[in-house]
Image (cartoon, grey):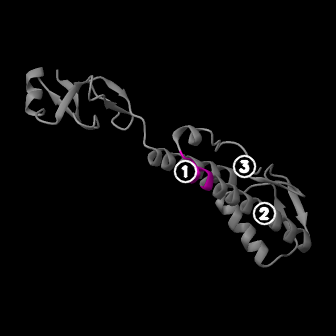
Amino acid sequence: MSIQATLYNKQTGEMFAQVSAQMLEDFATYTSGDVGAVLGTHDMAAFKVDPETGSVVARVPTLEEAKAAKWQQAKRCATKALHNGCETSFGRVQTSEASLAAFERLAALPRAIDWTMADDSIVSLSAEDAALICAEVFAHSDACHAYRQALRSSIEAAEDLAALDLIDINTGWPE
């Protein structure tokens, strides 16, 4: 049976490697100078070692790290909102990547067409109706992108972690 340990920088507390050994004494080969070891494996991104106490503590991200993580989450929310469908004058339509591509083709050459809606019902559209439904779908797409950019501006403007935590990226998206 082996013993697991996580190595860390004694000055910063940042964890950087996980190692195994047969006996506690074997960890001496890993630890010297600025390198310390704590028993067990730890999520190195979520925890660090308090340099003063040697205890494993939750790692508080820097403001820039937290902003980057929040922005990645916001982009996932934007993709979900964009591809979750939207209401039109004719009912709810799908807005998956394939559906948006179909709307782009229809917008390029509006014509009378039978269109399958999100609920699988069929709606007969005149050329004018086709142009209108495309405009409504593209307005939904534009609104999703605009909201995403507004969130990005808010995230970038956050001056501290508390302000960043107040930014709600899950609500307010166009439906």
Q: Where is residue 174 in the image (x, y as percent from the top left)?
A: 76, 51
Give the CA distance from mark 1 to mark 2.
23 Å
Q: Which mark, by number, is residue 144?
A: none
Tell me the element at label 2.
Answer: helix
Taking the image as shown, residue 168 lies to the left or right of residue 28, namely right
Residue drawn at x 51%, y 48% is 67
Residue ID for mark 1: 71
Residue type pointed to by label 3: Trp
Residue type pointed to by label 2: Ala
Residue drawn at x 37%, y 38% is 45
- Asked if residue 145 lies in the magenta stretch, the reply is no
Q: Of marks 3 and 1, which one's residue comes earlier in the chain?
A: 1
Q: Are marks 3 and 1 in contact (CB under 8 Å)?
A: no
Query: Mark 1 or mark 2: which is in front?
Result: 1
Q: Position of residue 130 (x, y in %)?
A: 86, 69
- Asked if residue 156 lies in the magenta stretch, the reply is yes
Taking the image as shown, residue 122 lies to the left or right of residue 39, namely right
Residue drawn at x 90%, y 64% is 124
What is the span of residues highlighted in magenta in the rendered image?
153-159
Residue ID for mark 2: 139
Give the CA distance from mark 2 to mark 3.
13 Å
Residue type pointed to by label 1: Trp
Judge whether residue 119 can be spotted in this image: yes
Q: Can you say whether 73 is above or below 24 in the image?
A: below
Judge whether residue 23 can be spotted in this image: no
Q: Do the residues labelled 1 and 2 touch (CB within 8 Å)?
A: no
Residue ID for mark 3: 173
Q: Of marks 1 and 2, which one's residue comes earlier in the chain?
A: 1
Q: Where is residue 145 in the image (x, y as percent from the top left)?
A: 67, 60
- How crowded pointer 3 is (Cα within 10 Å; few <14, some 14-19, many 20+) is rated as some
